[in-house]
Amino acid sequence: MWTRKELKDRAKITLKANYWKAVLVSLILSFLTGGGGSSAGNSASESYKSASGGDSLFSGVDPNVLAAVLSAIVVAVLVILAISFVLSLLVFNPLIVGCRRFFIKCREEQPSLKELVFAFSSSYGNIIKTMFLEGLYIFLWSLLFIIPGIIKTYEYLMVPYILAENPELSTKEVFARSKQMMTGDKWNAFVLQLSFLGWILLSVFTCGILLIFYVGPYSELTYAELYAVLKQKVNRSDSEVVS
């Protein structure tokens, strides 16, 4: 069994030993996973509201010109979405795995920032395929109802960590191992993430400064500790079965 306090205490020790690198990698990871997508979506929403807010905006405009402009906007949005998808698939996802690898290695050494790009030279194709399918499966499960999507999110929570240490494992093996690791610990992992809510709220009052320089790296190192204990649990279980 593990406790949140144990994981967090070990994460604090590791953070002290790798502070500035951990802050930088956490900031990069936040950019990769946080998504300027939401801000882009908000901007698009606001633009739509402005456009639909009054007929006077388009009064006197030639319908053909208006149609051409709207078509150009749609094409531009589709191109941006396509580029974002390709970047996410081929660049961002491998970097996310590299960031996880960095935080895992922080537990035992002071890793180099080169760990962030290790995926580009270690089973690159397998990593991008597995990470893509992880996102796809969670999306498809979420289409059913919210709850199945949440369950699958936690079931696949360890996928990037497993790839970070075992990039050569097949997609099927990675998913199976993540499922095995999270069995009986989905709720505990949820509560662990929830325990950082207070820190996140405090970060709002510091305009994100606290999040960048403490909460971000602290939480990421805690999740790396969670991966370590869950991996130990599975290894212990496998050894007992063999014996």
Image (spheres, helix red, strand yellow):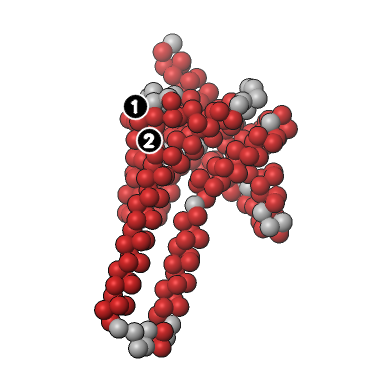
Q: Dot 1 lies on which element?
A: loop
Question: What residue is rendered at 49% in x and 27% in y?
Answer: 118
Kindly identify which numbered label has been placed on residue 62.
none
Q: Which residue is mark 1?
A: 170
To which quarter of the image does residue 123 belong? Answer: top left
Question: What residue is rendered at 43% in x and 82% in y?
Answer: 53
The residue closer to the viewer here, 151 or 37, is 37
Question: What residue is rendered at 30% in x and 68% in y?
Answer: 71
Measured from the top left, where is residue 31 in percent x and y? Answer: 54, 47
**Label 2 near label 1: C-beta < 8 Å?**
no
Alpha carbons under labels 1 and 2: distance apart: 12 Å
Q: Dot 2 lies on which element?
A: helix
Question: What residue is rendered at 68% in x and 31% in y?
Answer: 18
Given the image, on which type of amino acid does mark 2 rest? Ile
Measured from the top left, where is residue 219 in percent x and y? Answer: 62, 41
Above or below, 100 relative to 59: above
Q: Is residue 94 left or right of residue 202?
A: left
Measured from the top left, where is residue 156 in percent x and y? Answer: 42, 38
Image quadrant containing the C terminus? top left
The residue closer to the viewer here, 91 or 19, is 91
Above or below, 13 relative to 51: above
Image quadrant containing the N terminus? top right
Q: Which residue is mark 2?
A: 128
Q: Which is more foreground, mark 1 or mark 2? A: 2
Given the image, on which type of amino acid does mark 1 rest? Ser
Q: Is residue 163 visible?
A: no
Q: In the displayed image of the protein, which residue is found farthest to the top?
A: 243
To which quarter of the image does residue 136 belong? Answer: top left
Q: In the displayed image of the protein, which residue is found farthest to the left?
A: 64
Measured from the top left, where is residue 119 in percent x and y? Answer: 45, 29
| Disc on the earlier residue, 1 or 2 | 2
Number of residues whose C-alpha sits closer than 10 Å to that of mark 1, classed few (under 14), some (14–19) or many (20 or more): some
